[in-house]
Image: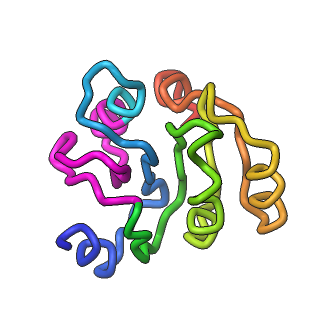
Amino acid sequence: MSEIKFLEAGVMSDKLTLIVGATTNKSRYAYFAASRLAGAGIPFIPMGIKTGDVFGEKIIDLRMKPELTNIHTITLYIGIANQEEWVDYLISLNPKRIIFNPGTENPVFFQKAKAKRIEVLEACTLVMINTGQY
């Protein structure tokens, strides 16, 4: 609940990132992304179906479809087979961009996002951060 209050108060960063598929599993790329975002000073909200904390942020339950504001970027770490239920919800958050990390590419999701004027990138969040392209 505190995460949502934090968001309602407003976040001033223009790069607030929602990590969809967040996990505490240190061998997963979503965990690495949280680590790199934290290290770069980019605020993030971890969201997934797992519980726990990553780099000081509690993982928000994706199944609750919480109302969030000020999301600049959604970075996806859930495969196409698990996306359908969340597509409309994620688009409703009105992000500026959605990063489809390797293995998450979804042409239907791409088109729906583009129709709402959301930038769609087939890219790797980790590479983008490491090369200063984030």
Most extreme residue toward the top, as rendered? 27
Work out whether 89 lies above or below 28.
below
Magenta run includes residue 63: no
Q: Which quarter shows the C terminus?
A: top right
Q: In this rendering, would 72 be left or right of 116?
A: left
Color theme of the render: rainbow
As displayed, is residue 103 above or below residue 112? above
In the picture provided, is 120 more to the left or to the right than 75? right
The answer to if 51 sits in the magenta stretch is yes
Task: Name the residue: 20% across, 73% down.
Answer: 1
In this view, the residue in front, 76 or 55, is 76
Write the residue at 72% across / 60% down.
118
Q: Nearer the viewer, residue 83 or 60?
A: 83
Report the magenta residues as a range: 34-62
Q: Position of residue 97 (x, y in %)?
A: 64, 53
Write the residue at 47% across / 54% down.
15
Position of residue 22 measured from the top left corner of the image (x, y, whole percent): 36, 42
| Image point (17%, 46%), residue name | 52
Q: Position of residue 19 (x, y in %)?
A: 43, 47
Q: Is residue 118 above or below residue 20?
A: below
